[in-house]
Amino acid sequence: EHGGDEPNQPFLYRFIVPDGYCQLQDPLSSEQTGTFVQDQGDLGARAHLELRGRITAVDATMTKMREQMEWLDEEMSRLEAEKNELAQRLAEHTAAAGDQCEFSVTVRPSVGVEHLPIAEEELQELSRRAEAIAQEGLPHGGEYVVAYTGEHLYSPEAAARATASQGDGDALVVDRAEWRGWASLLQSGDRDVGVLLLRRKYMPDAGLQFQDL
C-alpha cells in the first residue's frame, strides 16, 4: 500500500508473515524492526527474541549513522573545495581593492555546567579553542604565526557602566555570572585573524548553564 498521491508522502508496504514467524521488536523503544524469526513460544525463546530484537535495532542505527557520516564527509569535501576556490577569488579582489577589516559575532547555545572542564584546565581549553577558531579564518593548509595569545580579563561591571552611559538613563545592571576569556591573534601572509573567546558561566538565575561567545 502507498500513502497517497501527495508529494513526499511516505510509501507504506504490507507483508504477509509466514506462519510460525514473528517480527522482532526493540525491547527499549518497542519499535518494530524489519527482521522476522521463528517463534518457539517458550520463555527461553522470548529472552532470545528480545536480545535479537535489540541487536537488530542497534545494527540498523549504526548503519544509518555510517550513511550519515559518509554523507557528511562528502559534504565537507565539497564545501572545502568551494571555500578554497572562493578564497582564491576573494584574494584577487582584496589585492585589487586593498586591505579590509571585518568582524563577526557567534553565540553558542548554552550548555550545562557539568560539561565544563576542571578549573585547572579551563584556560588551556579556551586557548586551544580560540586558536582553532582563528585557524578557520586562515587560508586552508597554510602556515601561520601566533602573534599573540593570552587570557582576556573581561569585567561585567565595566561593560555595564559603558552600556548605561550610552543608554537613556536606565539603572545600572551588572551581570552576576562568572566570565573567563582568551584572546588569540594569528598571522598568515598578509592576513591577520584575531579571536576573542568569552565564556559566561553559572548564569543567573539557577547558575546551572554556561555559554561561549
Image (tube, rainbow, N blue to C red):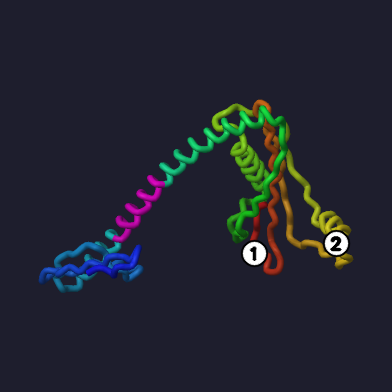
134 and 165: which is toward the camera: 165
> Image height check: is 143 above or below 60?
above
* Residue 60 located within the stretch drawn in magenta: yes
Amino acid type shown at disc 1? Leu
Residue 34 location in percent, x, y?
A: 24, 63
Query: What's the magenta region?
Result: 57-71
Determine crowd level at label 2: few under 14, some 14-19, many 20+ residues with C-alpha closer than 10 A. few
Residue position for label 2: 167
Q: Under tag 1, what secondary structure?
A: loop
Pinpoint residue 70: horizontal percent, then vertical percent. 38, 45
> Which residue is depicted at the point 72% across and 38% down?
101
Q: Report which residue position mark 1 lands on.
A: 208
- Seen from this angle, which residue lies furthest left? 19
Kind of residue indicated by mark 2: Gly
Q: Is 14 left, or right, of 129 in this rendering?
A: left
**x 65%, y 51%: residue:** 106
Secondary structure under tag 2 reads: loop
